[in-house]
Amino acid sequence: MYLDILPNANLAEPCMATFATTGTGVAVVAVRLWRDERWQWCAVTGWSDAGPVPAWWHPIEESGDGPARLLTGGECGLRLAQLPGNRPPAPHPGPTRWDLDDAGQWAEGFLILRPETEIALA
């Protein structure tokens, strides 16, 4: 899988990378990340010039480190927001109000995570 994300309204810095996928990706709506010295559930979406698109969780082989998971979004990267109460999302949660001007949200080009990282499927 080849990623080439140009600077955009969501992500100021460009990023480019190639990954060896080892299986089929699945759409996700949340991921549990280590942030601010604790585990936090975060809503996640892909981002495009038109707004939110699905975020995808792909199994990959990370050279030198072995199996990993790649979290990707649209042509403008990923958008994330900490979930209220730091709890996993309820089944079929209401949509997060994604907003590029919300200081509580942030962008990533992509994330490489451990295979055992907790996720919530779309």
Image (cartoon, rainbow, N blue to C red):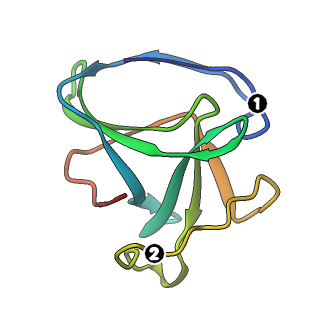
Q: Height in image: 91 above or below 118?
A: below
Residue at image location 39% in from the left, 41% down from the top: 56
Residue at image location 69% in from the left, 20% down from the top: 6
- Is residue 28 visible in this depiction of the protein? yes
Q: CA distance from mark 2 to mark 1?
A: 28 Å
**Along the horizontal axis of the image, is 74 left or right of 2?**
right
Closer to us: mark 2 or mark 1? 2
Q: Residue furthest right?
A: 101
Return the residue at label 2.
93
Q: Secondary structure at mark 1?
A: loop
Which is nearer the N-term, disc 2 or disc 1?
A: 1
Q: Position of residue 15 (x, y in %)?
A: 59, 22
- Quarter that holds the N terminus: top left
- What amino acid is labelled 1 in the image? Asn
Tell me the tag on residue 101: none
Indicate the quadrant where residue 71 lies: top left
Return the residue at label 1.
8
Out of 114 and 77, give the one closest to the viewer: 77
**Along the horizontal axis of the image, is 110 left or right of 61?**
right
- What amino acid is labelled 2 in the image? Pro
Q: Position of residue 93 (x, y in %)?
A: 45, 75
- Is residue 38 visible in this depiction of the protein? no
Indicate the quadrant where residue 78 lies: top right
Residue at image location 46% in from the left, 78% down from the top: 86
Q: Position of residue 112 (x, y in %)?
A: 37, 37
Q: Height in image: 57 above or below 12?
A: below
The local crowd at label 1, few if under 14, some if 14 to 19, many if 20 or more residues have their Cα within 10 Å, is some
**Along the horizontal axis of the image, is 94 left or right of 65?**
right
Q: Height in image: 34 above or below 68?
A: below
